[in-house]
């Protein structure tokens, strides 16, 4: 179980099955996935999420408020498609009831889920993707500080849906983020300058690495 200031991210329990299925039957919630999903499809997805957690220690989590009200889900998974266009990878995703929209729950829960997954899996990066029309999720990716990578955009078929196009963002793990920042010429020059100052016994006058570069 993970907790944030406002939320509880819980492993799936039998009590979550009905509200989970009700959420996936909501046309507004599932608009970016080709429309509502029937109970059999929802149950199969629920069982996949539970099995993923039992197998790897990460999955989509059931997200609840402090009073135990089911709000949606969020978490990190490996794709179940054996021939996924992106090959083997981990992906963070979320979905919430319409009543939970607009409160920052996706950003808050995704931040916790990413930190947990990076800490126990030791990954360099975790992907996130959404449809071109899902502006809400794209905004969450921006608030999380993920990096857009158009070279990874793909098209795939999920659960009998029509072909689905995904725009891809990257969450960088600690090692990957350090390497990415050091690849900036400006940051590399600052590091070289700082090493020179240290060798000469001088203090460092400015930060070595600037995330804004």
Image: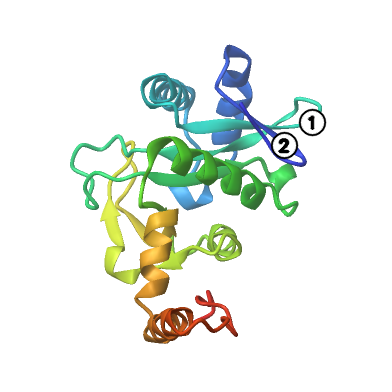
Residue in the foreground of this view, choosing between 100 and 21: 100
Q: Residue at x 60, y 43 (%)?
A: 112
Residue 161 at x, y = what percent?
Answer: 34, 43
Would you say 15 lies left or right of 5 here? left
Calculate the distance from the C-alpha at mark 1 to the C-alpha at mark 2. Answer: 6 Å
Farthest residue to the top: give it. Answer: 14
Q: Earlier in the sequence, mark 1 or mark 2?
A: 2
Farthest residue to the left: give it. Answer: 83
Location of mark 2 (residue): 7
**Tally of marks:** 2
Q: Is 106 placed above or below 56 here?
A: below
Q: Residues within 10 Å of mark 2 (few under 14, many from 20)?
A: many
Residue in the foreground of this view, choosing between 128 and 202: 202
Quadrant containing the N terminus is: top right
Residue 27 at least partly seen: no
Q: Residue at x 25, y 38 (%)?
A: 81
Residue 139 at x, y = what percent?
Answer: 59, 64
Q: Residue at x 34, y 58 (%)?
A: 165
> In the picture, residue 65 is in which quadrant?
top right
Would you say 149 lies left or right of 155 here? right
Q: Is 24 placed above or below 10 here?
A: below
Q: Which mark is residue 66?
A: 1
Badges 1 and 2: C-beta atoms under 8 Å apart?
yes
Q: Residue at x 37, y 59 (%)?
A: 176
The kind of secondary structure element at disc 2 is: strand
């Amino acid at each position: 179980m993970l907790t944030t200031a406002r939320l509880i991210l819980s492993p799936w329990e039998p009590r979550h099955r009905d509200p989970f299925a009700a959420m996936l039957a909501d046309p507004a919630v599932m608009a970016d996935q080709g429309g509502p999903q029937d109970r059999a499809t929802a149950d199969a997805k629920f069982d996949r999420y539970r099995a993923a957690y039992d197998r790897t220690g990460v999955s989509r989590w059931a997200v609840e408020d402090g009073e135990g009200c089911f709000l949606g889900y969020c978490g990190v998974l490996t794709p179940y498609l054996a021939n996924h266009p992106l090959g083997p990878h981990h992906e963070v995703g979320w979905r919430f009831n319409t009543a939970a929209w607009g409160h920052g729950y996706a950003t808050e829960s995704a931040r916790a889920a990413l930190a947990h997954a990076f800490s126990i899996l030791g990954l360099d990066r975790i992907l996130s993707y959404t449809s071109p029309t899902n502006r809400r999720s794209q905004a969450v990716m921006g608030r999380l500080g993920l990096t857009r990578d158009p070279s990874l955009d793909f098209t795939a078929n999920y659960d009998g849906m029509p072909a689905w196009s995904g725009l891809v963002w990257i969450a960088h793990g600690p090692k990957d983020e350090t390497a990415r920042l050091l690849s900036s010429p400006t940051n590399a020059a600052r590091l070289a300058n700082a090493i020179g100052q240290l060798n000469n016994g001088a203090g460092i006058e400015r930060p070595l690495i600037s995330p804004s570069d």
